[in-house]
Image: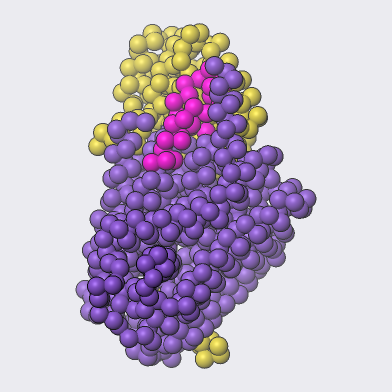
């Protein structure tokens, strides 16, 4: 570890929050239907969506209607992705001549893109034709990040926030070296006379959406570790910041819209503390001595397996924390090759519920659920009815909050438990022993949390894995969303109370500490036994292996 | 549910046209006009105009006169259509064996030197175009011998191609393998 590494981590994490602050104000204006400076260009486009779709953007929906609209939109998207993937063999714009995708892979991919997970069961460059990449993936990436009026929220967020940012980011990225071409590949002859076929794509436009849309599905198999997706430390800084910037912006936008800026700043502070601790922990583990390097008598000051030279430990650690803290799932190094405790931190950050800062809108929503639980726990301790943002928190809200919070471990641990004893599932593993358990656990954790990154040793492109991972993505996505909408509906119907002497202030250090405690206990207690059997055992094996060499 | 079907179908259709086709095509147009070199893969050509690789994509080099890249897990090694890491966990026995074999080979070539970690580990992409300055300098004596140069001459070429950290603290110092090999070929075709 060195000062450069710590400075890079601090800059990357801090820059995302600093840019998100003003961006959040803009985003809140968009959500509230206020005037923006893009109105002259985008108003007519927006009006076209409303008139063609028969949408009245001013008509506010009940939470039932909002949830139904959301499900309808996702159902249409799901059917479309599934159909295009199954039929890609006979559709145009397929210069590589790929065949149609198998039913279980098409199901998995459709579930993945609709839930914004992007679990890479397919290797992007070998299975997806140009048509699938451009048409379906791009659209899904855009729209599944957005979640008043569902249609107005969806259309305005996509047109006014994602689209302009993606245009700017993709052009910047091309200037910094990312390819942007319709050609599929180029043939080179190396100086030694060997042929090399270099895969190309419209990389920059997809990269921008993948990062900003909290989507994470790469153009290439190895995602942002690929030098075409992420060629330099500068592109790495910019794209890493893009992972978290809209998630944080949604916090600030919510704070402005709900007139609760101070309370939201407390949520940001709690999330940023946890995320920074995660990045620091991974940096520390990746500079631990790897047993293979120690045994071979090589410089063992950094674990370079699965890492790019231009990134090293600090860039890879920062990215690993940011991508698992948000529900992004892109990687710039291989998580399966992280040191055991580094891998455990990425698992743990996903298990906390993707709230650091999570996806655009979904992160802040689950964070508010955590805040409700925190005030509830505090209320129990002093014997008062808890309140949050001026609303009384009562039995129904807590039941719904617990439902949202409990579906996640049920899917992560339930499926992992079954897979761990099922021969059909175990065939997909690359490693036996604790690392094998980590592969299983990472798979369902990532899918349920809609993250999409992987311990790549797992061969997930098989009927069992494609199907169950697809189901856990759907559970992890839609159960919390519906519960959160129901909570919002219940809270909206209650009168707003003025704070009294008995109200727990939710904007100070005490509350930040309480909230961090609730998040860690919910995450820690539920998942610790599983982590103990996987990465923690492996950590002690690694220590023993290193000690036996000395 | 049915009342939601029309807006769902219409917005999906319009988003497809706008974001699935217009957006990537417009960006491609702008990119090809403004940054044709980057947009087409930062290709490197020889004097005759033949493509010899991309400045961003690693290549296998085995001859003694060339700077060698890191081990690669992409296909049979540096397959630029099949990017891949090894995905081996830290306790993987095959990893330990591979590292040991590679380290022994490097030690036989350069007795008594400290072998840097990147010299015996595969990258995340399997297409890492760069190596650490330490790994590059370690290869200087072999390259010098094969080309009839002195070790300091080769080291000077390597040092001139070291890229430092951005602003002194972002990323890691590194050397582009293909760039060094082109300079070496131009200077002393061994």
The chain painted purple is A
Q: Residue at x 34, y 51 (%)?
A: A273
Q: Is residue B24 visible?
A: no
Q: Is residue B38 left or right of residue A89?
A: left
Q: Which residues are magenta?
A: A280-305
Residue closer to the observer: A81 or A4: A4
Tell me which corner region of the image, top left, top right, bottom left or bottom right, holds residue B48: top left
Q: Magenta includes B130?
A: no
Tell me which corner region of the image, top left, top right, bottom left or bottom right, holds residue A270: bottom left
Tell me which corner region of the image, top left, top right, bottom left or bottom right, holds residue A548: top right
Residue closer to the observer: A515 or B185: A515
Q: Most extreme residue toward the right, as rendered?
A: A423
The picture places residue A348, in percent across and down from the top left corner, at 50, 50
Against A389, is A409 above or below?
above
Q: Is residue A537 visible?
A: yes
Q: Is residue A274 left or right of residue A91?
A: left
The picture places residue A139, in percent across and down from the top left corner, at 47, 69
Against A206, is B127 above or below?
above
The picture places residue A315, in percent across and down from the top left corner, at 39, 41
Q: Is residue A102 left or right of residue A338?
A: right
The picture places residue A523, in percent across and down from the top left corner, at 50, 55
Q: Residue at x 36, y 21 (%)?
A: B158
Against A400, is A449 above or below?
above
Against A363, is A54 above or below?
below
Describe the colour scheme in one phrase. Answer: by chain
> What count of labels does the image hold?
0
Image quadrant in which the N terminus of chain B is located: bottom right
The chain painted yellow is B
């Amino acid at each position: 570890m060195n000062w450069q590494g710590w400075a890079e981590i601090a800059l990357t994490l801090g820059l995302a929050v600093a840019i998100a602050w003003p961006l959040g104000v803009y985003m809140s204006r968009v959500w509230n239907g206020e005037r923006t400076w893009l109105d002259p260009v985008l108003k007519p486009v927006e009006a076209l969506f409303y008139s063609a779709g028969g949408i009245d953007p001013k008509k506010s929906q009940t939470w039932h209607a909002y949830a139904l609209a959301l499900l309808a939109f996702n159902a249409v998207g799901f059917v479309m992705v599934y159909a295009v993937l199954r039929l890609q063999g006979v559709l145009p714009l397929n210069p590589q001549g790929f065949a149609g995708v198998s039913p279980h892979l098409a199901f998995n991919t459709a579930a993945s893109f609709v839930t914004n997970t992007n679990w890479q069961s397919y290797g992007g460059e070998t299975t997806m034709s140009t048509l699938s990449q451009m048409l379906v993936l791009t659209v899904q990436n855009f729209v599944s990040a957005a979640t008043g009026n569902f249609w107005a929220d969806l259309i305005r967020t996509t047109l006014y926030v994602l689209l302009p940012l993606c245009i700017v980011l993709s052009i910047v990225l091309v200037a910094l070296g990312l390819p942007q071409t319709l050609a599929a590949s180029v043939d080179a002859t190396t100086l030694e006379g060997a042929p090399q076929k270099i895969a190309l794509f419209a990389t920059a436009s997809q990269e921008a959406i993948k990062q900003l849309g909290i989507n994470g599905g790469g153009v290439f198999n190895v995602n942002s570790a690929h030098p075409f997706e992420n060629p330099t430390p500068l592109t790495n800084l910019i794209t890493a910041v893009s992972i978290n910037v809209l998630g944080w912006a949604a916090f600030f936008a919510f704070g402005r819209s709900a007139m609760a800026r101070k309370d939201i700043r407390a949520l940001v502070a709690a999330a940023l503390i946890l995320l920074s601790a995660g990045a620091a922990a991974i940096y520390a583990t990746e500079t631990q001595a790897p047993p293979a390097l120690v045994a071979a008598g090589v410089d063992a000051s950094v674990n370079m397996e699965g890492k790019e030279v231009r990134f090293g430990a600090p860039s890879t650690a920062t990215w690993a924390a940011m991508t698992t803290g948000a529900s992004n799932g892109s990687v710039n190094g291989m998580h399966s090759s992280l040191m055991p405790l580094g891998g455990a931190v990425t698992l743990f950050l996903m298990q906390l519920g993707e709230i650091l800062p999570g996806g655009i809108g979904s992160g802040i929503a689950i964070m508010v659920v955590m805040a409700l639980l925190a005030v509830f726990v505090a209320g129990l301790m002093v014997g008062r009815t808890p309140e949050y943002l001026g609303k009384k928190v009562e039995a129904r809200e807590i039941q719904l909050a617990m439902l949202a919070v409990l579906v996640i471990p049920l899917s992560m641990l339930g499926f992992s438990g079954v897979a761990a004893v099922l021969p059909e599932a175990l065939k997909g593993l690359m490693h036996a022993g604790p690392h094998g358990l980590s592969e299983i656990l990472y798979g369902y954790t990532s899918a349920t949390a809609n993250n999409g990154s992987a311990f790549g040793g797992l061969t997930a492109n098989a009927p069992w894995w494609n199907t169950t991972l697809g189901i856990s993505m759907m559970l992890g996505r839609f159960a919390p969303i519906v519960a959160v909408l129901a909570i919002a509906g219940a809270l909206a119907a209650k009168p707003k109370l003025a704070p009294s002497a008995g109200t727990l202030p939710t904007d100070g250090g005490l509350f930040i500490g309480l909230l961090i405690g609730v998040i860690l206990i919910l995450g820690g207690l539920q998942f610790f036994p599983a982590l103990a059997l996987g990465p923690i055992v492996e950590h002690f094996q690694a220590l023993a292996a290193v000690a036996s060499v000395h | 549910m049915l009342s939601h079907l029309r807006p769902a179908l219409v917005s999906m259709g319009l988003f497809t046209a706008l974001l699935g086709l217009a957006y990537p095509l417009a960006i491609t147009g702008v990119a090809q006009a403004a940054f044709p070199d980057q947009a087409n893969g930062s290709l490197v050509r020889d004097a005759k105009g033949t493509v010899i690789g991309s400045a961003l994509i690693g290549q296998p080099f085995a001859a003694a006169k060339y700077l060698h890249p890191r081990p690669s897990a992409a296909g049979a090694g540096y397959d630029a259509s099949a990017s891949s890491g090894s995905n081996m966990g830290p306790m993987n026995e095959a990893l330990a064996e591979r590292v040991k074999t590679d380290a022994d080979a490097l030690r036989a070539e350069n007795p008594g030197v400290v072998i840097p970690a990147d010299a015996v580990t595969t990258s995340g992409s399997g297409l890492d175009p760069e190596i650490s300055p330490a790994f590059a300098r370690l290869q200087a004596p072999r390259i010098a011998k094969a080309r009839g140069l002195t070790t300091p001459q080769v080291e000077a070429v390597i040092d001139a191609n070291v890229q430092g950290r951005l602003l002194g603290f972002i990323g890691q110092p590194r050397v582009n393998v293909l760039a060094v090999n082109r300079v070496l070929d131009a200077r002393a075709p061994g």
